[in-house]
Amino acid sequence: MADPILLERWRCQPASIAASGDGCTGIDVAKLWQFSGLVTKVRYSDLRSNLPLTFRILDATGLSIELFATYAPRADALRKAGLNSKSAKLAALMKFLGDWLDRTKPLHALVWDMVRHESTIFEVQAVTAGVASDPAAISIDSVPVRSAGTVSHELTCNPIEVAKLVRAGGDLASIPREKRLFAYCASEAGAQIRFVELDALAEFLVGTADGTRTVTELAELLLQCGITLEPQDLVDSVRALVTAGLLDIVNTGA
Amino acid sequence: MSSGGSIRSDRTMLGFAHGPGTFPFLERNPGVADFVELPFELLRHDPTAASIRDRTPVILHCASMSIAGFVRPTQATLEEIARRAEDLGTPWIGEHLAFMSADPLPDVRMTAALHEPTTLTYTVCPQLSEEVVELVCRNLEELQSCFSIPLVVENSPQYFAVPGSTMSIVDFVIEVHRRTRVGMLLDLTHFTISSMNMGFDPQKEVLRLPLDQLVEMHISGLDLQDGTAWDDHGSVASEPILQLAATVLERARPRAVTFEYNWAPDLPDTVLLEQLRRIRGILGND
């Protein structure tokens, strides 16, 4: 329990238990290993405020004990290094989940969706929204840029629908699964964030608006992808994304 | 529940374990609870948490005394528990019938001994044997002498057979209470978890406990994964646990029932209120 690496070795090499000379033979190491998962999960309870749905889904899918037991050595190393802040724990857990989850499995993919959704909300809440550009002033010569702190994710579900279903105690297998694109950004109203579903064009704009290309140049880039859109028509899309807070307009000084 | 004070009531009081969602819930639903159970370890980490005494009566709960262990808590820890208990006006001090600290861990990789006691940061069910019963009795006598406020001890959940055990967890609990007459904190979820993992009938076995020593009951959820039941303060008590509560409350009246829903801040008010309604109904406190 106090040495997760040793426990992992005992689990993988049962013969090493007797060699330890601790009189530990006879202990159910597999159960002890699972118990270390419970303990680690409890130590990460402070993340539940930010990842409530993730934790509920991990429990409902029966993944949480195994996950946290596997994660225990990393959690122990983090703790011993004094990295006990919520953000440090969240970053380490996210990195671990990225490797550990088998996203070809629908329930694992659901966990990955929800942990990214909830952790992004936590991260974006810490971002201070800048002063919004004036949508009315946008033209084909404007240079859009992704707003500071804007994050987008491709998910396999709509997290709002998942939240409703989980809170109602519904069957996770009944969640409609399809590719969905969402963007998150800070709002001017303090801790609130904006959460917007993107269509393919909005995804393109949020992904390529890097503050170096004008709207006209973005239309040309679309054309290279086989999509014909007049720059003036693209202005309307950029304007909608600026209004939503996902894009800003670079002040070129012109 | 708008001001602090002490717990002085003849009826069974209902309260909640302290967690991130506790006070928001109690503020949205004034008057539904009589007290909040506060962990000593939180006070150690954040002494300002003691200010909740100004808002509500408090019961102090501990996981630092390692009652069933061979490593005694430091004198400083015991003095701090005593001071906190006096300051908070807690009617008793809850502690786990478990161990939390252990002898220094030999470093098998370095073939050298470490010198600091091992702190597990989580309570662990001890070996269930006569030797440990005697140890617990000695520890309890010594620990109780450090406090002017009575200790009550809480049954552990048993997740697996502990090597060297010679008795069931129910017999272990019975023996400790029989020999020490210490007050009982019966965690119904722990009891149910032990019954599921070790294979006994909780409705039958609970009646063997010395319920005349019952002081407090804990109620929380459990989580069944891969064939093992685990403690879960993030979900609410299931029907079998509430039925076990009914069985106990038909025969005994604890001074307090504590809902331990302190891991998850997002349990809906309606769900928590329903749990309160169920226990009030059993108690006849409607």
Image (tube, rainbow, N blue to C red):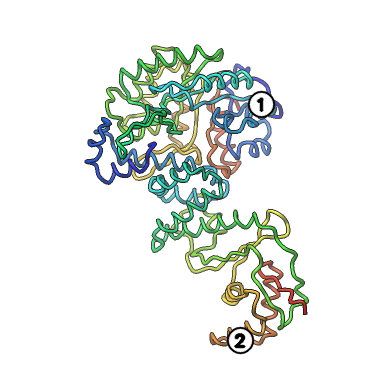
Answer with the quarter of the image where residue A33 lies: top left
- Residue B17: image x %, image y %? 56, 32
| Quarter of the image where the C terminus of chain A is located | bottom right
Q: Quadrant of residue B34?
A: top right
**Relative vertical location of residue A58 with respect to residue B85 in this rendering, above or below:** below
User: Given the image, on which type of amino acid does mark 1 rest?
Assistant: Arg
> Which dot, 2 or 1, sits closer to the camera?
2
**Chain of the residue under the numbered disc 1 shown in the image:** B
- Which residue in the protein does label 2 denote? A220
Give whichever of B113, A59 is nearer the camera: B113
Residue B42: where, in percent of width, then height? 57, 32
Residue B46 on image: x %, y %: 61, 33
**Residue appearing at x 29%, y 35% in the figure:** B111
Q: Label 1, secondary structure: give it.
A: helix
B259 vs B13: above or below: below
Residue pictured at 52% horizontal, 23% vertical: B77
Relative to the observer, which residue lies in front, B233 or A209? Answer: A209
